Image (cartoon, rainbow, N blue to C red):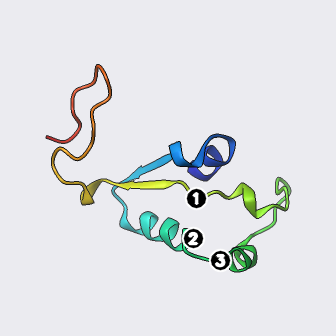
């Protein structure tokens, strides 16, 4: 879902928030792989638009790696990590 949101929106504004280090590792590996290799990984389906550009990896916010006070609070919201 995060890839889809990055595709339809702005990738730099799309974040996948997780505590699962495996998800972070998969996204990091996908981001660090050249386009030709990404094409090899692609699994076609009936909804496939045949474009690897649709699979835009989002930014990953890995919560266990954050230090206290590192997240900036949103206006009107209490801080998430004290």
Q: Residue at x 18, y 54 (%)?
A: 67
**Residue 60, image x, y percentages:** 44, 56
The label on residue 34 is 3
Q: Residue at x 15, y 48 (%)?
A: 68
Q: Is residue 1 visible?
A: no
How packed is label 1: few (under 14 Cα within 10 Å), some, or many (20 or more)?
many
Left or right: where does residue 3 sit relative to residue 29? Answer: right
CB contact under 8 Å: marks 3 and 1: no
Q: Provide the secondary structure element on which disc 1 rests.
A: loop
Q: Nearer the viewer's eye, disc 2 or disc 3?
A: 3
Figure quadrant of residue 79: top left
How packed is label 2: few (under 14 Cα within 10 Å), some, or many (20 or more)?
some
Residue under numbered circle 2? 30
Q: CA distance from mark 2 to mark 3?
A: 8 Å
* Of the pair 74 and 64, the residue shown nearer to us: 74
The label on residue 57 is 1
**Residue 39, image x, y percentages:** 75, 74
**Residue 22, image x, y percentages:** 42, 69
User: Which corner quadrant holds the C terminus?
Assistant: top left
Q: Is residue 31 above or below residue 6?
A: below
Q: Provide the secondary structure element on which disc 3 rests.
A: loop
How packed is label 3: few (under 14 Cα within 10 Å), some, or many (20 or more)?
few
Q: Provide the secondary structure element on which disc 2 rests.
A: helix
Q: Residue at x 19, y 42 (%)?
A: 81
Counting every numbered tag in the picture gives: 3
């Amino acid at each position: 879902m995060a890839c889809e949101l990055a595709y339809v929106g702005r990738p730099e504004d799309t974040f996948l928030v997780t505590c699962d280090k495996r998800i972070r590792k998969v996204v990091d590996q996908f981001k660090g792989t050249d386009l030709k290799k990404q094409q090899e990984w692609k699994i076609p389906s009936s909804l496939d638009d045949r474009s690897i550009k649709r699979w835009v990896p989002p930014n990953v916010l890995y919560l266990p790696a954050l230090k206290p006070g590192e997240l900036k609070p949103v206006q009107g919201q209490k801080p998430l990590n004290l």
